[in-house]
């Protein structure tokens, strides 16, 4: 049994959507909240790759930021290596977590050289100059960049793929335990995406990393991950081994999502009916019910919880009663 | 009987930049008949956006037509003046651009600007302008905009990127052009919405016999939306053919590489077969075949001479592997860079 590296326990993240000062309080107005993540529980095991899949507004980036300590939960708690994350231990825990972002142009400081960018995470360490240079060379070579050629360059001199490799080098230089990757290849050309995905897999297999990969691209999720968690309107609706999710999706939203993905196997794509839900005022009961072809009465009033069905867990009343 | 709508012949367009002249398009041949949808697939620097802009004559000021011809509805458009083009744009050809935010006037509400475009069509058709708003609301509903009447009163900055793109697509559909050119229209929106919009484009194609040029970097989307696929690389069309043929039996090594780069299956089944190297620079393209530095089937002739276009089944391919001249050389062929397995 692999042990749990990090865990979200009934975590919610609400962002204020309206001004709520003295006047609003006096007028007894209710504050408006964007419920980006709403009561999510998720365990990530050591040395696994978990892909968080969903569309915009599903909450996956926010959940990723909660796991990487860039956001503090409104409710619930984040556990990392058995410790509950709080203000005091956050700096210590953060040293074991790194993030790779979507747009390398925005995530690399344009005024710094590649050397400065990649070594930045080691700023507070007690490594001496030579040790840092060694780590720099090692990290750059690990991502396929020649240190002699690239260490003094600036981001503007690099191609998109090279920038993203620098971002990955920066993420691995401090030997993290946990790497959160937010759409790491979405901004790259198709041929470069393949190279970077291969690189991420190579790095993972050589080292004791754990990845949380956030993506809207199901094919990428399927390729790289061991497990896939599908998010919709701030909740996890289905989670399980990647192959099971791809070939035997149980949640109606997952099924609709898979049908809408263009692939070379078919000329037909089919989108689900209806609109993406409002996060200010999500539909009552199951958030997918207005768009669900199987909606029942209970779906309109009560939110389903994740229940195990075979190898996966599904939050859907089609399965809720069966597995009781 | 379908008529030839667009004929591009040997088109060369050149950008003048501080780094020198860049031939963004270097001898493009492409033809489209009425009711046909063509997807232009390529990566950064392939020239696919430039080709779209060339057809509507909206190239940036530092770009000019250096050679070749574009014939639209039987009329050669490269020599036309701007006012002559204004008559053609919107009626015959309409383009949806890549960056939706730049397509709308930021100081005007959505309603008046889209209606303005629709009025052009109504005046041309001699219809009463009273019906325009109703048709606009229907079009916004077709692209799944909730509360269209509310959206009409908003300013562009109040809409999300996805909503703006949908408004632009609705505008394109409302214009009912003979040829719609869409440059990455679905790249900024969710995959479920993309599926709805691709379906909508298909309906329009069938109901109004509308031709479509769909520019995309995603070959899977190209396959879904198009009858014909044109694969572009570094300013050249390297393969053009019916989408089933290009995808199921690709001829050009670049097309094969693009298809096998697509993530499929799981990592346990092996690494993705990626194309080595980076997309060719258009500023300093490699001599001979532009793809040769990345090609695993490279031969001597590829390094020196640009390949001729050769017909294969129903497609056309620019590759020495398929030319009779190089057939003799294939026997002596030493496969080049061998890290890539196809």
Image (cartoon, coloured by chain):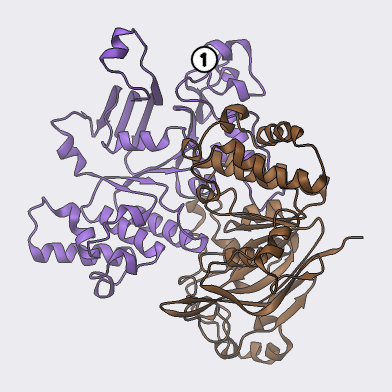
User: Looking at this view, is A190 or A93 the one in front?
Assistant: A190
Quarter location, residue A145 = bottom left
| Residue B219 in the figure: left or right of residue B9 | left
What residue appears at the point 33 percent right and 69 percent down from the top-left corner?
A: A157
Helix, strand or loop under label 1: loop
User: Looking at this view, is B255 or B338 the one in front?
Assistant: B255
| Residue A184 in the figure: left or right of residue B171 | left
The x and y percentages for residue A31 are 35, 16
Above or below, A61 relative to B330: above
Chain that is purple in the image: A
**Is residue B198 among what the camera can see?**
no
What residue appears at the point 15 percent right and 54 percent down from the top-left corner?
A: A122
**Is residue A27 among what the camera can see?**
yes
Q: Point out the image quarter for the N terminus of chain A.
A: top left
| Residue B313 in the figure: left or right of residue A236 | right
The x and y percentages for residue A156 are 33, 66
Above or below, B205 relative to A119: above
| Residue B223 in the figure: left or right of residue A33 | right
The x and y percentages for residue B35 are 81, 55
The residue singled out by tag 1 in the image is A284
Quarter location, residue B190 = top right
What residue appears at the point 31 percent right and 40 percent down from the top-left corner?
A: A46
What residue appears at the point 56 percent right and 53 percent down from the top-left corner?
A: B264
Above or below, B204 relative to B30: above
What color was chain B assigned in the picture? brown
User: Looking at this view, is B282 or A132 the one in front?
Assistant: B282
| Subunit of label 1 | A
The x and y percentages for residue B70 are 72, 72
Total numbered circles: 1
């Amino acid at each position: 049994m692999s042990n749990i590296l990090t865990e979200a326990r009934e975590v919610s993240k609400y962002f204020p959507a309206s001004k709520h000062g003295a006047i609003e309080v006096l007028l007894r107005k209710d504050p408006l909240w964007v419920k980006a993540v709403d009561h999510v529980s998720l365990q990530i095991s050591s040395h696994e790759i978990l892909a968080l899949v969903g569309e915009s507004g599903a909450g996956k980036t926010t959940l990723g930021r909660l796991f990487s300590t860039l956001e503090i939960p409104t409710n619930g708690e984040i556990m990392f290596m058995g410790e509950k994350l709080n203000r005091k231990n956050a700096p210590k825990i953060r040293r074991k977590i790194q993030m790779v972002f979507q747009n390398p142009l925005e995530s690399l400081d344009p005024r710094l050289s590649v050397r400065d960018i990649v070594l930045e995470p080691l700023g507070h360490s007690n490594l001496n100059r030579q040790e840092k240079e060694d780590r720099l060379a090692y990290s750059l070579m690990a991502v396929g960049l020649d240190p002699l050629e690239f260490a003094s360059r600036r981001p503007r001199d690099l191609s998109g793929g090279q920038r993203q490799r620098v971002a990955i080098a920066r993420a691995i230089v401090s030997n993290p335990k946990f790497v959160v990757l937010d759409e790491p290849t979405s901004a790259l050309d198709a041929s470069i995406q393949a190279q970077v995905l291969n690189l991420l897999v190579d790095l993972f297999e050589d080292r004791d990393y754990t990845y949380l990969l956030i993506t809207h691209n199901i094919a990428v999720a399927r390729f790289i991950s061991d497990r896939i968690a599908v998010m919709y309107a701030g909740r996890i609706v289905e989670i399980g081994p990647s192959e099971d999710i791809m070939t035997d999706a149980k949640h109606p939203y997952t099924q609709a999502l898979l049908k809408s993905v263009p692939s070379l196997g078919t000329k037909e794509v089919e989108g689900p009916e209806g609109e993406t839900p409002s996060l200010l005022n999500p539909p009552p009961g199951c958030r997918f019910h207005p768009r669900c072809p199987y909606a029942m009465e209970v779906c309109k009033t009560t939110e389903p919880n994740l229940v195990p069905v075979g190898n996966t867990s599904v939050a859907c009343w089609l399965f809720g009663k069966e597995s009781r | 009987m379908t008529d030839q709508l667009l004929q591009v012949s040997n088109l060369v367009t050149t950008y003048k930049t501080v780094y020198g002249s860049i031939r963004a398009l270097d001898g493009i041949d492409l033809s489209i008949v009425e009711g046909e949808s063509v997807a232009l697939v390529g990566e950064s620097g392939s020239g696919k956006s430039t080709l779209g802009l060339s057809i509507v004559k909206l190239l940036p000021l530092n770009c000019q037509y250096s050679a070749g011809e574009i014939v639209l509805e039987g009329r050669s458009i490269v020599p036309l003046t701007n006012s002559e083009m204004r008559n053609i744009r919107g009626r015959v050809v309409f383009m949806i651009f890549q960056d939706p935010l730049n397509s709308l006037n930021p100081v005007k509400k959505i309603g008046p600007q889209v209606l303005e475009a629709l009025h052009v069509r109504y005046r041309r058709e001699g219809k009463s302008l009273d019906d325009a708003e109703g048709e606009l609301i229907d079009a916004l509903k077709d692209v799944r905009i909730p509360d269209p009447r509310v959206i009409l009163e908003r300013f562009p900055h109040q809409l999300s990127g996805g909503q703006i793109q949908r408004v632009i697509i609705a505008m394109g559909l409302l214009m009912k052009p003979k040829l719609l050119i869409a440059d990455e229209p679905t790249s900024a929106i969710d995959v479920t919405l993309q599926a709805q919009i691709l379906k909508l484009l298909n309906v329009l194609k069938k109901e109004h016999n509308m031709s479509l040029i769909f520019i995309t970097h995603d070959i899977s989307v190209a396959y879904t939306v198009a009858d014909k696929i044109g694969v572009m690389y570094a300013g050249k069309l390297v393969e053009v053919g019916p989408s089933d043929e290009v995808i199921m039996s690709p001829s050009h090594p670049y097309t094969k590489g693009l298809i096998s780069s697509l993530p499929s299956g799981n990592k346990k089944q092996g690494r993705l077969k990626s194309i080595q190297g980076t997309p060719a620079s258009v500023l300093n393209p490699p001599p001979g075949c532009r793809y040769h530095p990345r090609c695993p089937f490279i031969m001597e002739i590829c390094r020196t001479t640009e390949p001729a276009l050769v017909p294969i089944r129903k497609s056309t391919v620019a590759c020495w592997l398929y030319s009779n001249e190089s057939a003799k050389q294939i026997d002596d062929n030493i496969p080049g860079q061998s890290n890539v397995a196809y």
